[in-house]
Amino acid sequence: MHHFHAQNGQLCAEDVPLEDIAREVGTPVYIYSTATLTRHYRVFADALAGASVPHLICYAMKANSNQAVVSLLGNLGAGMDVVSGGELMRALSAGVPAHKVVFAGVGKTDAELAEGIDAGILCFNAESESELAALSAVAVQKGTRAPVSLRVNPDVESGTHAKIATGAKETKFGVPASRAREIYARAAQMPGLKVVGVDMHIGSQITALEPFDAAFNVLGDLLDALRSDGHPIEHVDVGGGLGVPYDDAVADPPRPEEYAAVVARHSNRFGCQVLVEPGRMIAANAGILLTRVVHRKEGDGKTFLVVDAAMNDLIRPTLYDAHHEIRPVRPAGGPSEIVDVVGPVCETGDYLALSRPLAPQDRGDLLAIMTAGAYGAVQSGTYNTRALVPEVLVSGSEWAVVRPPMLPAEQIKRERVPDFVKAVGQDMARS
Ligand code: LLP
């Protein structure tokens, strides 16, 4: 469910014609819908509440950390799941209370641990014994105890793309469930730690409920053991990961209510607050990437639409073989043709879709790359000295640029040519 639909023969974001945004901001541009973001948050919160799960939703900011998006979700009541000092800063500057922030990640530095302690966050989700020791040391230095959960790796197969599966024992994430008790016992002895919970996350874009069910079973068993060992567990963090529909031709993933029902089946046994960290299901289809056809090119038995968005703007097709639906902004009649939709970057891997049936498009036509609100702009870069892509947020008939583009001139201005390089030029000029 989203709010990008045709009105008067052209695709709109809520009530704003995409052509208006393209005209004023240019393309490529990410466009997000306030109504969709709000709806997804509420539907998920209502599903958990409806299933009587005592919960806090900590939105996984890595999916889309634009200040406007984080502020909106914070205003709706969301906490945040952050994975760096930078994301923590974003959450706090968007006004999200620190006591609703959890801090994940395998490589938190001492400086980041200190920032989390200073802010007074809800919990550190620690991923190793080394991190527990470092966190304890930093907390002791500050004369306090840091609230901590251990991320446990339940060793379940989530059936998702290998690059985004995290719950199998071969990945770098968490500690093996079989060693968790022993590590918890050690954590409880550390002078700078306060053990408050248990944490888990098995992967992203998971399209079945069974992996969650299996992982929650492991969590339940562990919780029983930890409680009998005397650890006062106040919350269980079950991670994020519920998939979204990317491909109109593939069956939809489970709905939030179905996911909530699985959580609810385990939450009595958990007997405490449940934290959930959805990212993709809140943001993905709340956003599109709008792009314009620059050239139409007939190859050897192949038609290419060269558009002005590229892998530096949306890397998901290149990196994860991801499918994104593509909709013409002005739906044209006539039979569709099979095209490769490619960007201008000098790599064969620079494409947004391969062998895709699409109504015939020409130079200047606008295309919407759908379901690009999560892991889109946050993974963008400036490869080939392209502008860092701008972002727009729409609400009803209003809209605002929430990140202007970072243009090449600005990128070049940030760089420095040291004197020893200038000297090389001078030597050359003399010789
Ligand atoms: N919690 C933790 C600890 C995570 O590592 C992640 C995602 C989430 C929550 C949120 O998962 P979600 O609800 O969004 O599935 N760049 C990839 C996705 C990477 C996901 C990393 N972790 C992509 O474009 O598909």
Image (cartoon, grey):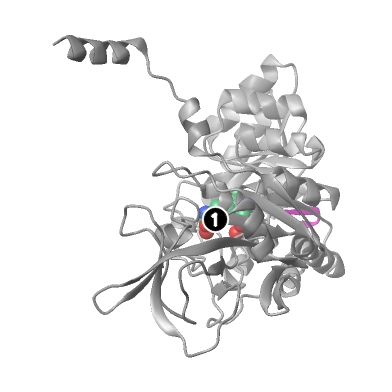
Front position in the image: 188 or 427: 427
Q: Residues within 10 Å of mark 1 (few under 14, many from 20)?
A: many
Front position in the image: 75 or 164: 75
Q: Is residue 295 left or right of residue 13?
A: left
Residue that carries the numbered disc 1 in the rendered image: 28
Q: Position of residue 169 (x, y in %)?
A: 45, 54
Q: Is residue 415 left or right of residue 332?
A: left
Residue segment shown in magenta:
270-276
Residue 82 lies within the magenta run: no
| Quadrant of the displayed image that contains ligand 1 | bottom right
Which of the 4 quarters of the picture holds residue 23?
bottom right
> On screen, 98 above or below 62?
above
Who's the residue at 32% across and 52% down the image? Answer: 346
Which of the 4 quarters of the picture holds residue 2?
bottom right
Amino acid carrying mark 1 in the image: Pro
Q: Is residue 422 left or right of residue 38?
A: left
Who's the residue at 56% across and 64% down the image? Answer: 205
Q: Position of residue 122 (x, y in %)?
A: 76, 38
- Quadrant in which the C terminus appears: top left
> On screen, 42 above or below 400?
below
Who's the residue at 56% across and 74% down the image? Answer: 328
Can residue 18 be seen here? The reply is: yes
Front position in the image: 395 or 267: 395
Count of labels in the image: 1
> On screen, 133 above or below 124?
above
Q: Position of residue 317 (x, y in %)?
A: 44, 63
